[in-house]
Image (cartoon, rainbow, N blue to C red):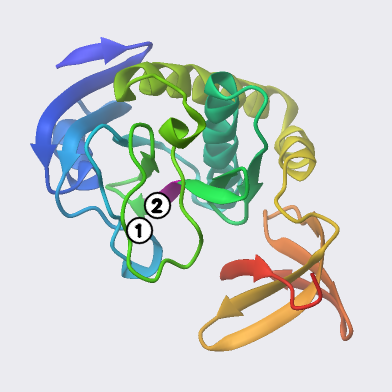
Amino acid sequence: MGKIENWYFEDLQETPSTNDSVLELLSKCNAPCIVCAAVQTKGRGRLGRKWEGADGNLYVSFAYQIPILKIGHYVLLSGLAVLETIKTFAPVARVEVKWPNDVFLEGKKVSGILFEKGPDDYWVMGIGINVARTPQVENPMYQITSLADLNVQTDRLKVLNVLVKHFDFLKMQYEKHGFAFLRALWLDNAYNRGKSVVIKQNGKETEGILTDLDENANLVLSTNEGEKHILVGDLFEGRNE
């Protein structure tokens, strides 16, 4: 067990899931901690979906304490930390946060994030970033890319170190300035803000103009039936775009 910034840290050669491994580390140190792995064999995404891996990409999980009523805020914060990390390595590229927890690079998905409940008031934040390779996925929901596709030459641990610094900084700013800070930064970098989008959830679709976030980090859409606040779902470009 080592340290990265103020976090306990382990880098594994292989694990089924870093989300599971970070819980094992948490049981030993009982403090905020991070587990990274060179190979992840059974990664998972939102709603039980499989997270496809490829050699050289970043698979990492953070375990830390989050007040239950603030979980939506931290979902946004995590996406912004990845956004700022990708911008660090690809400063002239178009990088956007796509609600609720994806990061897009030049219009293609480069990162996904999964939150899972841990013991007591701990939560686990699993992050996958395509660093060295673009995974081959059959019938993907979105087009996929990697930093390597933009000729960015780096490695997963360099990306991790930058990610931790951005996460710590954004968390500090959030604790100092409140949700308004995160909300403004997220909206400034939001995928399809001001455009027509479709939210798919449980077989239903809601279409409207992406206008805002509410205080609970729900997405706000302007629809033909008035303003709607969306808690969960998958966001796609609207049919009129």
Magenta stretch prevailing secondary structure? strand
Q: Residue 114 vs residue 189: left or right?
A: left
Q: Nearer the viewer, residue 146 or 113?
A: 146
Q: Please determine whether, in this image, residue 166 is positioned above or below residue 186.
A: above
Q: Which residue is mark 2?
A: 114
Q: Please determine whether, in this image, residue 130 is positioned above or below residue 34.
A: below
> Residue 202's x, y, as percent?
51, 84
The residue drawn where x is 28% and y is 26% is: 31
Do callouts 1 and 2 mark residues in contact (Cβ within 8 Å)? yes
The residue drawn where x is 58% and y is 34% is: 83
Q: Residue 220 vs residue 87: left or right?
A: right
Residue 86 visible in this rendered orientation of the protein: yes
Q: Is residue 11 magenta?
A: no
> Residue 47's x, y, as percent?
38, 69
Q: Which residue is mark 1?
A: 45
Quarter of the image where one finds residue 84 = top right
Magenta span = 111-115
Q: Is residue 113 magenta?
A: yes
Q: Residue 32 vs residue 82: left or right?
A: left
Quarter of the image where one finds residue 9 = top left
